[in-house]
Image (cartoon, helix red, strand yellow):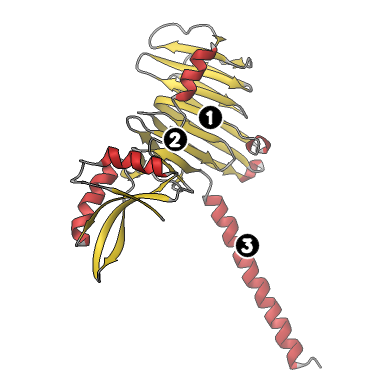
Amino acid sequence: MKSIDHLYYTENKQSCFIVLFFLCSLLLSFSAIADGAKVKALQMPAWLERDGNLIALKPGLRVQSGDKVSTGANARLLLEMDEGSLLKLGEKAELNFDKLIRTEEKQGLFEAVLRLAKGAFRFTTTTLGKAQKRQVNVRIGAITVGIRGTDIWGNSKTDKDILCLIEGKITAQRAGEPEFEMHDPLSFYIVPKNKPALPVAPVPDAKLAKWAAETELQNGSGVLNIDGKWAVNLMSLASESAAKPIIASLTAAGFPAEIEIALVNGKKWYRLRVSGFISREDASAFAAIIEGSNSITHPWVVKF
């Protein structure tokens, strides 16, 4: 006959297995729905549009299928896709994430369909990302690009679409024309609007440097980073009801302001703050930009 202690141990062990199984299932479910991209850094203003709602982008915010991200004047955006690639956007750009999904029936193949409506864009496969299975199609205006692991830059302008292969191998296709392969590094392809496409040609170093700068973050100009430790306090208000309309206005303008509660001499204040600047210089640059808008006067920089 089994002892009571033995029976208790057996039942407890079974319970642990049940809990462990539940936790593993939960983690697997979360990873399945988490496929997409994450904002790593940005220069404001920048927005996420989801289900008709407009959200000011901030580091750590996740992007998923169906979302659209856009940037304003002098803005930049850096996103990391879950399969390891990096996406960069320049100013006044608009990128649609038509599809972001890991297809389990295809043994973990990561599929993405990205549509650049306007502005400059760069897609770079990192060393980590090169080990991932992927099927990524990017539409740059009238050009459709098939990516399997590479580094490209593109721009959709009002008068033409530009595709530059920096490294790797891709397929390219203008709407209504045959697909072809681009495999020569540092080559580019231009499709004017309503005119024949130009032949693929080598890109001059000076032109490539100018293009690349259009999608790079400009340190010291107000960069927010997921690890940033500096903030700008915009103003303090005596009531939350007074703070909310200003928060809404700042969000619409592409600035991810939040409300922080502060106690000063025993009195509660509702402080409006933008957090996550990578340096005091970046925070000071933003303070100078935002001063004078939305009744903001004398914003001050803090470290948290």
Q: Which marked residue is nearer to the observer: mark 1 or mark 3?
A: 1
Quadrant position of residue 28: bottom right
- Residue 166 relative to residue 259: left or right: right
- Quadrant including the C terminus: bottom left
Q: Which marked residue is nearer to the observer: mark 2 or mark 1?
A: 2
Name the element at disc 3.
helix
Verify CB contact (< 8 Å) between mark 2 and mark 1. Answer: no
Q: Residues within 10 Å of mark 2 (few under 14, many from 20)?
A: few
Instruction: Give how far across and how far down residue 65 sits, in percent.
Output: 46, 41
- What residue does disc 1 label? 123
- What residue does disc 3 label? 24
Instruction: Give how far across and how far down residue 218 sits, in percent.
Output: 43, 32
Q: What amino acid type is highlighted by mark number 3?
A: Cys
Q: Nearer the viewer, residue 19 or 47?
A: 47
Name the element at disc 2.
loop
Residue drawn at x 33%, y 40% is 286
